[in-house]
Amino acid sequence: MFTYYLKLAFKSIKRNPILSTLMVMAIALGIGASITTITVNYLMSADPIPQKSQQLFYVQVDSWDPNEAYSDNSDEVAPPPSQLTYTEATNLMAAKRAYKQTAMAKSGGIIEPQSQDAKPFEASIRLTFADFFSMFDVPFQYGNSWDEQSDINRDLVVVLSKNINDKVFGGENSVGKNFIMSGKTFRVIGVMDNWQPVPKFYDIGNGAFDLPEEVYMPFYLKEELELPNWGNVNCWKTPEGEGFKAFLRSECINFQMWVELPTLGDKADYLSFLNNYVTEQKELGRFPRPLNNRLSDVMTWMESQKVVDRDAKLMMWLSFMFLLVCLLNTIGLLLAKFSGKAAEIGLRRAVGASKAELFKQHIIEAACIGLLGGIVGLGLAFLGLQGVKSLYGDFIDNLATLDTNMVILALLLAVVSSVLAGLYPTWRACNIAPASQLKSQ
Amino acid sequence: MLKMMDVKKVFRTDLVETQALIDFNLHVKEGDFVAVTGPSGSGKTTFLNIAGLLETFDGGKFELDGQDVSHLNDRQRSRLRNEKIGFIFQSFNLIPDLNLFDNVDVPLRYRGFNSAERKKRIEHSLDMVGLAQRMQHLPSQLSGGQQQRVAIARALAGEPRFLLADEPTGNLDSQMASSVMDLLRDINAKGTTIIMVTHDANLAKQAKRNIFVRDGKVSEVTVSPLAAKLCAV
């Protein structure tokens, strides 16, 4: 009977093209608005590394001003600063107490392509440790990451993003070739394949939806080459002395650190280590605030950093309200449509259709209208996302994309909403008294 | 076969209570052709709706094919309607955007026949009413008489025990009405019991029995002389 009811549904939709179009458009508008905002929220809050997001922890220690917390938060204990000082980054890395660990910082420099025709250009740098690549499952197109010895030796090696390799080496295997950046010659040791975690969880403070950096090099080259600070730098007291070295010794925060801790026991041990470390530092006259160290897994970290913007959430709820209004309109239109079919319903009752069969027939019709609304709504959502892109610019490019999950969700939402909207009109249709309809036709 | 004993039906609104049937008694035997006549508002159509299980009743007893129908639920009543009763209406009640084949198919769908069985029955019943060549036509492409023939084919496709006809010729001219009546008599001759409500005394005379309804009661039952003569021939 299902295919029969499908056939009847499409005949019925064709029978009243204007009414049907109005219903499809009402659902499409609601779905289009909802899916546009859901997509943005969904991508903002997606787990960027689901296979190990519960084993990766962001490290925070409270080295901030004794008189004023890093951020106001009246609900709970004020959170520790969102980044580390260079001192903590290097000390914690030297301690090597986690299964894997990487401190990191964002920087940038000028690349000088070897080709005479190409002009020098600026690119972003991620200063990090060898573990970065295996911790975050970074895929490689050519070569591999540098090793721990290169970290220690401060070797002039780089891993390039696919994009930079395409730009500088025409996409060829550049492993072993020289690469000039910031006036120094590096050896290319690896080329990443396409890698674009959304959100860019490992450095949320410097643009959660930015593209990953273009060049990766050992962390200690920051000090060695005096590479500039990119991203947020916050200080609660002025560095003692002048120059780059003074900045590195200061209480200014510009560094991030992640550790991989496979078990809960490992996490507890590492937190205990952090507390001991801070206690030691307190004895040296640092860390004037109460003990307040944290390890946050990927999703907790993103939540605490409010990656999903409050406005985006509000927009999503408003779009749901709009969908509700569209559905209320659809209920009215379905009532009109089904009451126009009273004679046919009476006839079907007379020749043996039970109320249950009529219910199935009309709910399938409502679902078909919903499906059509969903398809048109997907088109509107696509246009809506283009609008979001043009409104907010390139930085939201990664967010404004419909993936398979969102397409399925849009169609499901459309069908479920229209079935819900169809319940009352269908119930009314099933309870039409057949005798009165048959006589009055 | 169809037995109504002291059947009552009351229509109520907030202000008015109307006794549509009062102690309605009727016994229709298998193979009968009964014409029900009476003035407007006498209860003819109410009787037909109750007989066709389209309406419930408020008192008395009603047996259809030996089965007491008083306490059947919606699904059981629908099943009984589908299997045992065929309807013919004054205004044909064809579904305008379904072709003749699909219109006749409607009751068979609810019966659960497979497609081969449905096709066989549809073709046979359309052939019986002389419209087998026009299966793909829409109702709007047919005359009134032809539309009523399709409605008869639809009613017959499920091979029901009863055919309930409410003013089957009311919307037809005399020539078409006569042809539809001929068809109904043929159907009855093949064993289908027919109950027909009509205003037309001449048509009623062509039935085997005439029942006159007045004020919600059967007031007179007569054997039609014409029918008796036809039967004798």
Image: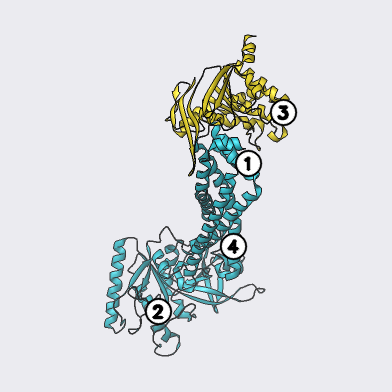
Chain colours: A cyan, B yellow
Q: Secondary structure at mark 1?
A: helix
Residue at figure coordinates x 56%, y 44% from the top left: A365
Q: Earlier in the sequence, mark 2 or mark 1?
A: 1
Report the chain holding disc 1: A
Amino acid under disc 3: Asp
The residue to which callout 3 is attached is B173
Q: Position of residue B97 (x, y in %)?
A: 66, 38
Quick check: do tags 2 and 1 share a chain?
Answer: yes
* Label 2, residues with CA under 10 Å away: few <14, some 14-19, many ≥20: many
Mark 4 or 1, nearer chain start: 1
Q: Chain of mark 4?
A: A
Name the amino acid type tagged 1: Lys
What residue is pinned by disc 1? A11
Front-lying residue, B190 or A257:
B190
Are both tags, 2 and 3, on one chain? no
| Residue sitting nearer the eye, B108 or A382 | B108
Mark 4 near mark 1, Cβ–Cβ under 8 Å? no
Residue located at (66% from left, 74% from top): A116
Q: Is B174 placed above or below A81 here?
A: above
Spatial CA distance of label 2 from label 3 is: 102 Å
In this view, the mark in front (2 or 4): 4
Instruction: Give the alpha-carbon distance from disc 2 to disc 4, as whole Å.
Output: 44 Å
Residue B128 in view of the camera: no
The reply to whether dot 3 and dot 1 touch (C-beta < 8 Å) is no
Q: Which residue is mark 4?
A: A384
Give x and y (percent) for residue A195: 51, 63
Residue B60 screen position, x and y as percent: 43, 27
The chain ID associated with circle 3 is B
Is label 4 in a helix, a strand or a loop? helix
Toward the viewer: A393 or B24?
B24
**In the displayed image of the protein, which residue is found farthest to the top?**
B233
